[in-house]
Image (cartoon, helix red, strand yellow):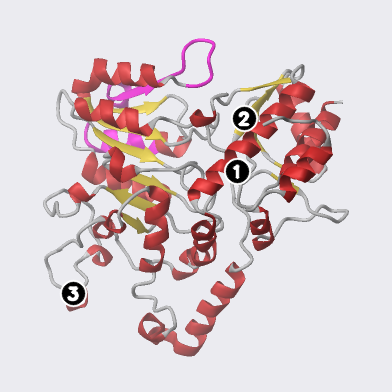
Amino acid sequence: MNVSVERSFAVAQDAADSLAPLRAEFFIPKRSGGGDSIYLCGHSLGLQPRGVARVLNEELEHWEDLAVEGHFASSRPWLPYHEQLTSSLAKLAGAQPLEVVAMNSLTVNLHLMFASFYRPRAGREAILIEQRAFSSDQYAVASQIRYHGFDPDTALIEIAPRSGEDVLRTEDICALIEREGQRIATVMLPGVQYLTGQRFDLEAITRCARRQGCVVGFDLAHAMGNVPLRLHDWDVDFAVWCSYKYLNAGPGAIGGCFVHERHAHAVDLPRFAGWWGHDKSSRFQMPSQFQPIAGAEGWQLSNPPILAAAPLLASLPLFDTAGMDRLREKSLRLTAYLESQLQARLSHALNVITPTDPEARGCQLSIRLHRSAAEARAVFDSLAAAGVFCDWREPDIIRVAPVPLYNSFVDVWEFVAALERALQ
């Protein structure tokens, strides 16, 4: 892309963007003085699709009019409600419908997956994670190790970037797996790292780990709906995600889970069971013995929370309309444009810690300012006061994500201009 620092270039890019009309499908927060804010925080909470209120109100009306009969007699019966989400989620995950299910929240799903896929024994009790994993992942993993009677001080292997670097190298991850693989029970890494925005090479990591006999799972909170995934083809054992970031399903929305089809009929695989995971044909006969549904649905515990799942019925069709390939192409251009503007106008004041290789990142760039932590925080606060939504991570990182579903090239230009003013 031949890039200009003039605003007119961004305007022209938006005019030529076939996905630009999707922006009108979302509510953009307004500035205090009027006009759209600059919202670049979809990595934390996606914007509300305009169709959400309609879907939620319809479910409230079904509850009002039908009460318990809404499970069977509404226009979208609650009993199989989550099944409406399966096809779209499978496409985003690069999976077969059998392999995905919308259920619970991310960390709950992570614990459910570990109940089945972390089966430690003496000599092979370790879990591999990244040193700077999201705290919920760290807590969950350490608690699983303790629950199984091992010590996280010895059974938790944390991999860190090389000295002086901010992101992990795939060759270093694979080298550690090859070196320690015989004592690693489960590998648990992110699809996209929440702090740096680094996209992990899940295919290479999975291939390396499976050669060592390790079970492989991924946290896709920052990857689902952000980057293309092919979980089935990559032979991943399990994955979990939330839906309130790039999937735009709202705060506390229902999460999701992937379980590879080779585990679909593993009825003897240990798991924490609940009645919604029981065979559908006999579920309401209340048998005393649990018979799991084949596939990812067999890990369900309870009937789905309808009001937490409904927003996905407004959001997922937008992904179906756009297609992940087109969204990714726009994401690459938006992120490259953001990087180029930062380098051209503000390279003296900051550096981007997200990889420069487009294939090694999603749509998030993480920025470190050449200021003290207190001064950098003051810059962030100035951006917020000016109606710019991004976010701050201690001690010195500003995270920015131009999301292709609703962000524009003008959004990016306006952000860099606002950052330039805040730095002054």
At label 2, the amino acid type is Ser
Label 1 vs 3, first from the N-terminus:
3
Q: Could you tell me residue 36's position as x and y percent?
A: 79, 53
Q: CA distance from mark 2 to mark 1?
A: 19 Å
Q: Could you tell me residue 53's position as x and y percent?
A: 61, 71
User: From what the image shows, is residue 254 above or below residue 185?
Assistant: below
Residue found at x 42% / y 59%: 88
Considering the numbered disc 3 on the image, is that residue within a helix, a strand or a loop?
loop
Residue count near mark 1 (Cα–Cα under 10 Å), binned few <14, some 14–19, many ≥20? many
Label 2 vs 1, first from the N-terminus:
1
Q: Left or right: where does residue 231 sit relative to residue 264?
A: right
Circle on res. 366:
2
> Mark 3 and 2 residues: CB-CB less than 8 Å, in contact?
no
At label 3, the amino acid type is Ser
Question: Given this view, does label 1 or label 3 mark the residue nearer the observer?
Answer: 1
In the image, which residues are magenta?
139-167
- Asked if the magenta segment contains residue 146, the reply would be yes
Residue found at x 19% / y 49%: 263
What is the quadrant of residue 186 in the picture?
Answer: top left
At label 1, the amino acid type is Lys
Q: Quadrant of the N terminus?
A: top right
- Asked if the magenta segment contains residue 390, the reply would be no
User: From what the image shows, is residue 414 above or below residue 52?
Assistant: above
> Mark 2 and 1 residues: CB-CB less than 8 Å, in contact?
no
Q: Could you tell me residue 108's position as x and y percent?
A: 37, 50
Question: Which residue is identified by label 1?
Answer: 330
Circle on res. 281:
3
Circle on res. 146:
none
